[in-house]
Image (tube, rainbow, N blue to C red):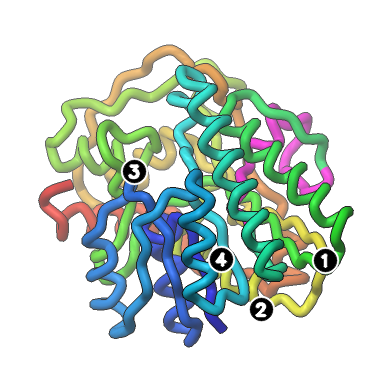
Amino acid sequence: MKVLVTGGLGYIGSHTVVDLLNENYEVVIIDNLVNSKIDVLDKIKKITGKDVTFYEYDLCEKEKIEDVFKKEDIKAVIHFAGLKAVGESVLKPLMYYKNNLMSTINLLEVMKDFNVKKIVFSSSATVYGEPKSLPIYEDFPLSTTNPYGSTKLMIENILEDLYKSDNSFDITILRYFNPIGSHKSGLLGENPNGIPNNLMPYIVRVATGKLKILSIFGNDYDTVDGTGVRDYIHVLDLAHGHVLALKNPKTGLKIYNLGTGLGTSVLELVTTFEKVTGVKINKQFVERRKGDVAACYAAINKAKEELGFAPKYNISDMCQDSYNYVKKNKDI
């Protein structure tokens, strides 16, 4: 089966492509390289020994998507592509709404035109806003605290309305929590362009001396140590969740949390990183970041029961693999 992966050279996308290839899917990638790098293609081939078809296209240009569907016999889509930095979205909301919504609508229109009805969408735990209780279940009320999260929720609404209008669509929405870690080979990992927005790339850059100090946003939350609590999931476990979603015999519109079900504070993550690697992380506390919530971790019962989803890796694994990646790639 030939699967189109949008944003397939990005952090989560590239790991998912590797898992797909290992499961003998054919893969076509569309990526505009705004927050990814072309050398990831070679790394995917090095890991898997297999080729993928790559198009350096932007989903905001509908005719480019049509070109891919004309050339390739696409049977399913995994949709990662989109701008994804919470802080940047607060500063540049119009850019986020325009890019994330337009690109997705273009993609869905072309899928409909070519009668490709199976899609797995990369959503986010940000759609739960400030949760009233923990852990977070899929049927919790939805709200958002930042424009990035709002685009994810709007796309979920678009997908739900699309399904109501045409229930021959097979739609899976995956709400992920906080992916970290890297491929065991050390070839693939999180390598954002510019200053990192996510925690782990920041930690590893401080560990290697590329950055002087880690800024921790807020130490006055109502949590175990005052720092934000998140459900960190190894990117390999998260990637495999997408393959399980493709294989899921259940059809229709389905929504799953993908996390570990465990909450870890920022300080706990930093301490674990120091313990695993033996590297001291210089850190400072700064003001809370707009749009951040105090604590967020998943109930994953539904994904376990319906997808057979079972995370294999713990926080120590995530820290070790992240550090291995940055040690192997000196340019990060």
Tag nearer the camera, 4 or 3:
3
For this rendering, which residue is in front, 50 or 129? 50
Q: State the CA–CA distance, disc 4 to disc 2.
A: 17 Å
Q: State the CA–CA distance, disc 3 to disc 2.
A: 30 Å
Q: Is residue 171 visible?
A: yes
Name the residue tied to disc 4. Answer: 311
Left or right of 130: which side holds 291? left
Q: Position of residue 240 (x, y in %)?
A: 53, 70
Q: Indicate the secondary structure of the residue bearing disc 1.
A: loop
Q: Earlier in the sequence, mark 3 or mark 2?
A: 3
- Which numbered tag is attached to residue 34? 3
Q: Position of residue 15 (x, y in %)?
A: 41, 65
Above or below residue 159? Residue 3 is: below
- Magenta stretch: give its range: 121-139
Q: Earlier in the sequence, mark 2 or mark 1?
A: 2
Of the residues shown, which amino acid type is indicated by label 1? Gly
Name the residue tied to disc 2. Answer: 247
**Mark 4 and mark 2 residues within 8 Å of each other at the beta carbon:** no
Q: Earlier in the sequence, mark 1 or mark 3?
A: 3
For this rendering, which residue is in front, 237 or 148? 148
Q: Residue at x 55, y 25 (%)?
A: 292
Quadrant in the picture for residue 158: top right
Q: Residue at x 71, y 62 (%)?
A: 112
Name the residue tied to disc 1. Answer: 252
Few, some or many residues within 10 Å of mark 3 (<14, 14–19, 20+): some
